[in-house]
Image: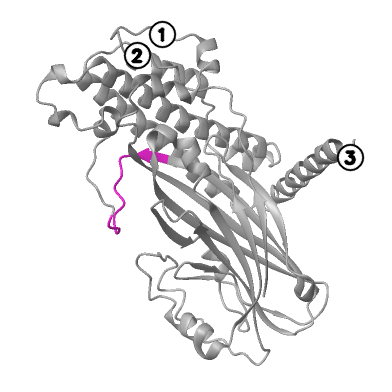
Amino acid sequence: MDQQIFNIGSASAYNYMPPPPPSPKSQIRTNSTDNQIKNSSLNNIQQLNPTNQNLYADIQAQFELSIELRKFINIDLFQRGYYQIRLSVKCSNKQIPIKLTLQLENEQTNQNLSDVMFPSTVLEEYAVSKTFLILYRNEEIMLDDHFLFKISTLLNAFNLIESFEKLGLELNVELWFTESDYKPPSLTTLYSSGVQNSKMSPSNSFSNIDSSINSTNTMQLLCCRTFRIKFDPRQGIHLQIPCVFDYFHLSSVSVTLHCSLLTLLPPVMLGTNLQRNLTLSSILFGKDLSQFKSPYEVTASLINRAVYLHNFICTLLLASYESLQEHIFKMMNYLSDYDRQKIKIEYVDCKDKQRKLCQIIQNCTDPETIDDLANRHVAQCSAENIMLWCIYLDNFSLNQIISPYLAIEYHNKRVRIKFFINLLFFN
């Protein structure tokens, strides 16, 4: 088995951030100008607590990774038989708690299969494509498999961008094979029991496939490709990459990836030993407001900390919304007028909305009011991100029109990177 590692995703050049926190010496806050918003830095959070105490606060981030397997091309596989693609997402940073739920989305494409193929399915933490028969060279198989990886993790609210960079997400694309005399079981019992599975609670709906594929070692792993996913929540990921396996198993599969940040909420990672009943106020003020014995304990420094975290969380959620919104409107240009009219979406000025949310809470000095506004704003931004993401999946998943444009964009990015590398090292 051969394994190589590639990097996908890129850093964002996002140009607006939350307003810098005011001086802890005063509780009176003024509205920031546009220049302050653009030139502010996350390092300003250190001004809130010079002793560097209590600068850690857990917040649960939920984002989803949509992966589509489009077309498998047999370039020169020398063995005839049954092949399948297996996908898995791992977190290389073992210090960060993470919960992963895997779901199969293309139930309709699994209905129209011949008797010589398995449908796509989920086996514990593995997404398994349709099992297909390879007989000739230059053979193309349309898979059209769609899997959704739902990822929840606990991150430091003060260093969210750096925490996402340290996640170390890896996508493993594996090529599996078995001999041509392999007989799949009956498919009639597989469609009625559902297509959802989870790493925490495995489903029994595909136990027949699981036992048949893995028993007596009928399937063997031929090659594995590993892609490091560099996810910036302010930009998201939208690309289609060609995954080419090694020389001894010369074949390729086109993989389409979409990733977007959905929510930033108090940590409630059910099913793990890290479950905590924290409120948003405990993140903003260091502890829940009910634990303060007197209103005078909520100092100006704590209020400034709460205001800044509110602004930062809302800004990050709005940045994720704006990047996905821009990608949707860009892809809509490639659709027909009929398909474009079916997408019900209105443009949202996220920068203007960010300024309004920051200005509303900037004028508040009461901790209860700040807590109430923060809960309302964060919940609203998270809900809007989820709704926009659902609209995107409903209208652009397994879309044959936009796939070529995603592939061209990825190719152009690689060409530009190689061009600048040549300029740097050979001139």
Mark 1 vs mark 3: which is more N-terminal? 1
Tell me the tag on residue 31: 1
Q: Amino acid at mark 1?
A: Asn
- Of discs 1 and 3, which sits in the foreground? 3
Asked where in the image residue 413 lies, by quadrant, the reply is top right
Q: Position of residue 306 (x, y in %)?
A: 31, 24
In the displayed structure, 364 sits above or below 246; it is above
Look at the magenta stretch and give its main secondary structure: loop
Residue 385 is situated, as x and y percent measured from the top left of the image, at: 45, 37
Looking at the image, is mark 1 or mark 2 earlier in the sequence? 1
> SS class of the residue under badge 1?
loop
Q: Tell me the magenta residue range.
A: 263-273
Above or below: residue 138 compared with residue 182? above
Q: Earlier in the sequence, mark 3 or mark 2?
A: 2
What is the three-letter code of the residue carrying label 2? Gln
Locate residue 79 relative to residue 256 in the image: left or right: right
Q: Which residue is mark 3?
A: 426
Q: Residues within 10 Å of mark 1 (few under 14, many from 20)?
A: some
**On the image, numbered disc 2 is attached to which residue?**
362
* Residue at the limit of the structure toward the left, as seen here: 293
